[in-house]
Image (tube, rainbow, N blue to C red):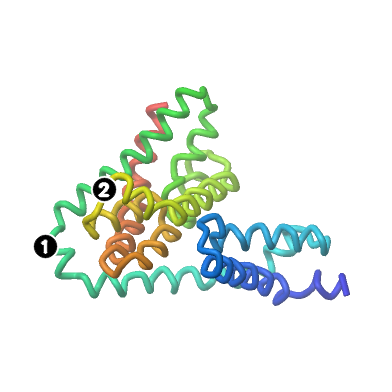
């Protein structure tokens, strides 16, 4: 039985999907932010791998099938943006300023805390791309000499926090305009935040989708600049 599980591509993919679905069920049922689907699926997969004795490399090969769906799913985020194209054109200047400010604050925040805690430069550049989508963040981290695995963890944690607390933070800071909400969530917490933005509203989801792409490109340039500031 154990050998069958170790050699099964679909088993590794199935436990990932089951864990995520379990997270969705728990969040709807209990309505508690901590039961974020991604967080629940991560914990579930870790438990299953420990119990079955499957090593991470084997799991990664099996679950890697899901990675192929990332590109088309990301492209699909352009649909709500297209539906709000007129709104985008009317507020283009404000949107550009908003995303630029968000990217700068994200990079500057990492710089400030790295200085305060005297982090090594390798850890500093590892954390710089924490607020952008994983594919771009991994490339930046590797190019600047960071630790890619920690970068991925930082991106996932940032996304989970954004997904869990974005709406509450917007209320606390009295951010009520849908465009401002979407830009803030997408710039700060990439695709996972965008999933939450889409739950809040169509405009929020569209603006958050736009933020993912633009913030990613700006971070590529900004990270290179901040690299030389540390």
Q: Name the foreground residue: 25 vs 83.
A: 25
Say which quadrant the C terminus sits in. top left
Q: Name the foreground residue: 201 vs 105.
A: 201
Residue at 68 percent across and 70 percent down: it is 15
For discs 1 and 2, the disc positioned in front in the rendered view = 2
Say which quadrant the N terminus sits in. bottom right
Q: How many marks?
A: 2
**SS under mark 2:** loop
Residue at 40 percent across and 62 percent down: it is 196
- For label 2, the crowd category at 10 Å Cα-Cα, with few meaning under 14, some 14 to 19 and many 20 or more, is few
**Do the residues under discs 1 and 2 have CB atoms within 8 angstroms?**
no
Question: Label 2: which residue?
Answer: 174
> In the figure, residue 190 lies in which quadrant?
bottom left
Question: Label 1: which residue?
Answer: 90
Side of 4 where 97 appears, left or right: left
Gap between marks 1 and 2 measured at Cα: 23 Å
Residue 78 percent location from the top left of the image: 32, 71
Q: Residue furthest front?
A: 30
Residue 54 percent location from the top left of the image: 79, 62
Which of the numbered marks, if any, corresponds to residue 204? none
């Amino acid at each position: 039985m154990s050998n069958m599980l170790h050699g099964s591509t679909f088993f590794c993919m199935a436990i990932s999907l089951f864990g995520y679905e379990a997270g969705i069920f728990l969040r709807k049922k209990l309505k508690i932010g901590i039961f974020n689907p991604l967080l629940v699926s991560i914990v579930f997969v870790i438990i299953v791998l420990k119990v079955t004795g499957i090593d991470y490399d084997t799991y990664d090969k099996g679950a890697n099938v899901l990675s192929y769906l990332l590109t088309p799913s990301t492209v699909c985020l352009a649909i709500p943006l297209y539906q709000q194209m007129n709104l985008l054109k009317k507020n283009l200047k404000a949107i550009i300023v908003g995303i630029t400010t968000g990217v700068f604050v994200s990079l500057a925040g990492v710089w400030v805390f790295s200085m305060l805690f005297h982090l090594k430069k390798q850890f500093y550049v590892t954390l710089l791309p924490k607020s952008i989508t994983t594919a771009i963040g991994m490339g930046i981290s590797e190019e600047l000499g960071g630790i890619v695995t920690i970068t991925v963890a930082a991106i996932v944690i940032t996304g989970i926090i954004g997904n869990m607390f974005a709406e509450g933070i917007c209320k606390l800071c009295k951010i009520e305009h849908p465009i401002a909400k979407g830009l803030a969530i997408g710039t700060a917490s990439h695709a996972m935040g965008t999933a939450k933005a889409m739950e809040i509203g169509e405009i929020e989801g569209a603006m958050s989708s736009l933020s993912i792409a633009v913030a990613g490109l700006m971070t590529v340039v900004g990270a290179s600049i901040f690299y030389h500031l540390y």
